[in-house]
């Protein structure tokens, strides 16, 4: 899982796919943090992605860096604890102008039942589950 998180950080931007009804939705994200042995991402509860994940927690992430990509599929589970939010915001202090661990908007979610697949055009896929 640490390798997955480091890859997302090196890529800088990854794309999170959710569904809204029968319509796929994809948008860029940039947060990835390990807290208590789980891979977390962050968003705001006021955003449509939060509502989409509440209705259907299945999601995928895709990131590309230096000729390799990773796809992460699993369920995103909300962790509403202040400690989890603080850990994310401490890792990304640039978000503190918009989010705070004590506000009603900050949302952190962790992957459950996840499969990460690293791939490239020159090597065989490598699968990591967590």
Image: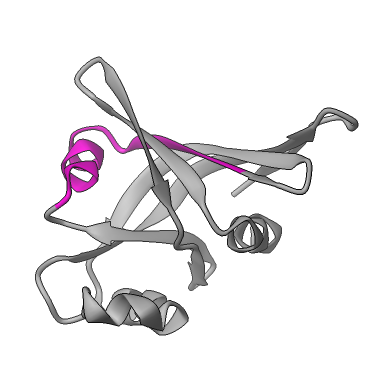
Residue drawn 69% across the image and 40% down it: 69
Position of residue 74 in the picture relative to residue 125 (left or right): left
Where 70 sits versus 96, above or below? above
The answer to which of 6 and 121 lies nearer the viewer is 121
Q: Judge whether residue 31 is colored magenta.
A: no
Q: How is the image coloured?
A: one colour
Residue drawn 24% across the image and 80% down it: 97
Residue 68 percent across, percent down from the top left: 76, 41
Position of residue 128 in the picture relative to residue 24 (left or right): right
For this orientation, the residue located farthest to the top is 22
The answer to which of 10 and 37 lies nearer the viewer is 10
Residue 100 percent across, percent down from the top left: 21, 80
**In this picture, which residue range is highlighted in magenta?**
47-63
Residue drawn 41% across the image and 46% down it: 28
Residue 128 percent across, percent down from the top left: 69, 44
The answer to which of 105 and 37 lies nearer the viewer is 105
Q: Judge whether residue 51 is colored magenta.
A: yes
Where 67 sits versus 37, above or below? above
Residue 37 percent across, percent down from the top left: 54, 68
Quadrant of the rendered structure where residue 125 is?
top right
């Amino acid at each position: 899982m640490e390798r997955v998180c480091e890859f997302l950080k090196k890529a800088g931007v990854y794309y999170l796919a959710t569904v809204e009804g029968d319509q796929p939705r994809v948008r860029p994200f940039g947060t990835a943090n390990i807290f208590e042995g789980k891979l977390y991402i962050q968003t705001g509860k006021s955003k449509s992605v939060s509502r989409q994940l509440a209705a259907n927690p299945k999601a995928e992430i895709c990131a590309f860096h230096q000729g390799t990509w990773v796809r992460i599929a699993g369920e995103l589970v909300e962790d509403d604890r202040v400690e989890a939010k603080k850990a994310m915001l401490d890792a990304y202090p640039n978000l503190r102008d918009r989010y705070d661990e004590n506000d009603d908007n900050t949302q952190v979610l962790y992957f459950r039942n996840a499969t990460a697949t690293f791939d490239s055009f020159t090597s065989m896929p490598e699968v990591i589950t967590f």
